[in-house]
Amino acid sequence: MSVIRKLQQQLTQKERTAVEITQDYLDRLQTLEPKLHSFLAVTADKALAQAKQVDDAIAAGTSLGPLAGIPIALKDNLCTKGIRTTCASKILEGFIPPYESTVTQRLADAGAIFLGKTNMDEFAMGSSTENSAYQLTANPWDTSCVPGGSSGGSAAAVAADQAPISLGSDTGGSIRQPASYCGVVGMKPTYGLVSRFGLVAFASSLDQIGPFSRTVEDAAILLGAIAGYDTKDSTSLNVKIPDYTQHLKTDLKGKRIGLVKETFGEGLDGDVATAMDAAIAQLKELGAEIVEISCPNFRYGLPTYYIIAPSEASSNLARYDGVRYGQRAETDNLLSMYKQTRAEGFGAEVKRRIMIGTYALSAGYYDAYYLQAQKVRTLIKQDFEAAFKDVDVLLTPTVPSTAFKAGAKVDDPLSMYLSDLMTITVNLAGLPGISLPCGFDQAGMPIGLQLIGNALREDTLFEVASAYEQATPWHEKMPQV
C-alpha cells in the first residue's frame, strides 16, 4: 500500500496526529543518522510547527492538501526560505535563502512537512555522494557502500525509512542511479514539467527535480503535487497535469516495451543481467509485448554529457565569486579575493568540471567540442523519437552494476562517470525516466530497472511501473540498519 495513503488514513481516522507521525520520523531519523549521515540539516522545529498546522486544520474540518501531514526530506540544492541551503559546498556554507523555491512552496501548500535537507555531491556533481564537503552518506543496505549520487542523501533517507518520501534533482541520473543503489523508486520527469525556480543550477538544460519513494503510487502522488507551469521558470511547460494515480494498473495488455539493445551484453554485471531477464519475463506475463529496439547513438551519451554539462556548470558557477553571498576569502585585492574564495570554496570534482567546461567553451574549441556535442545530442533525441513510434516504453538496466564500496572510485573519475552510462541519454533528450527495484545481487545489494517514456508520458511510465511493482515483492524489502 502507498505509504502516503496509509499515513493519511491514520490521520483522517484519528489513529495518529500529524505531530505524532512527524515526531516518530524525527526520532527514527536521529537514531539512524550516526550510521547513515543522510541529512545535512534537520529542521525539527519547523516540521513540528507544520504538523501542528495540519492537526489544527483537521480539527477545524478544513479541506486538506494531497500531502497533508506527510513528512518529506529535501535535497540541499532546493532553496528553502530561512533554512540553510549549502549544495554540500563550503562556498555556500551558512547561506540562508531569502525566498522559497517553487517546488518547496508547492509542497508547503499541499500540507507536506519538512524534516530537513539531505546530503549530496557538491553542486550535484558526482555519482556517489562522496563529493560532499561535509560528510559521507552510507548505503542503508551495506554501510560500507555508497548510496549513489548526487541525490544519495535523499535516496538513503527513504530506503532507511528516515522519511516516507523525498525530493532529489537529476542532471544525468542523479535520482535514478541512487534509487537503484538504495532499492527505492526514483523518478526524473520530462524536462520542464517541474519548475526549476529555486533549484541551484548545475546544468540548466539538463536539471530536473523529481521524487523518491517506496512505491510507484507515492511517486505519482508526489509528482502530481510539484508539477505544473511556473511563470518564474522560462523553461516551464504550460501543460495540464493529470492525476497520475488514475493510471496505475495491474496488467499491461496492449503495451509494447522496447529493450534498448545497446544497454545489454558486454559490461553488464551478471547479477544485473539475471535480474533484467526475470523482469522482462514478468512484464511478458503481465501481457506486454517485448521488442528489441536499437538506439545507435546511445553509446555517445557519456562523452556528449561530459562536454555539455561541465560547459553549463562553468557558466552557472561563475556567480560564486565571494562578492554577493556565501564564503569570502579575506585578501588584499579584488582579484586575489576571487581566486582564493573559489580555490577554498570549491571541491576537487567541481573544479575539475569547471575547468573542462571552460576549456570546451573557450575560443578555438567551442566549435570542435561544445557545438559538436549539441549536434550529437540532437541525434540521440532523434533515436528516441524513432523508437517511440514503435513502442510505448523503453527498458534498460538503471546502472550496469550494484553499489560499490566507499572510496573504491574516488581516484578514478572516469570509472565513476560510467555509473551514469544508462541514465545520461534520458536527460540529453529531456525525457521522463523511472527506476524501480527489480531484485538483489548475491551480496544482497539492490538492483534497479529503468523505464524510459516519451515526452510528457509520465502516465504511461507509472502504468507500466505500477503493474510490475504489484506483481513482484521487491518494493516490500527493507534494509536492516
Image (cartoon, rainbow, N blue to C red):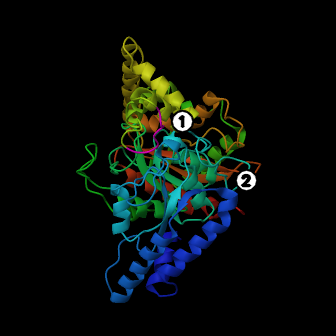
Name the dominant secondary structure of the magenta segment: loop
Q: Would residue 193 be found to the left or right of residue 276 on screen?
A: left
- Residue at 36% from the left image edge and 27% from the top image edge: 378
Is residue 32 among what the camera can see? Answer: yes
| Above or below, comparing residue 424 to residue 25 in the picture | above
- Where is residue 404? Give x, y as percent: 70, 42
- Residue at 34% from the left image edge and 56% from the top image edge: 98
Q: Would residue 170 be found to the left or right of residue 36 on screen?
A: left
Magenta stretch holds residue 75? no
| Above or below, comparing residue 419 to residue 93 in the picture | above
Q: Nearer the viewer, residue 440 or 237?
A: 237
Is residue 422 among what the camera can see? Answer: no
> In the image, what residue type sits under mark 2?
Asp
Q: Nearer the viewer, residue 446 or 279?
A: 446
Q: Residues within 10 Å of mark 2 (few under 14, many from 20)?
A: many
- Where is residue 420? Give x, y as percent: 55, 37
Q: Quick one: SS at disc 2?
A: loop
Q: Quick one: SS at disc 1?
A: helix
- Residue 371 sits in which quadrant? top left
Residue 142's disc is 2
Q: Residues within 10 Å of mark 1 (few under 14, many from 20)?
A: few
- Where is residue 186? Give x, y as percent: 51, 52
Q: Nearer the viewer, residue 246 or 4?
A: 4
What residue sits right under mark 1 in the picture?
Answer: 344
> In the image, what residue type sits under mark 1?
Glu
Residue furthest right as drawn: 443
Residue furthest front as drawn: 332
Range covered by the magenta-colored residues? 325-331
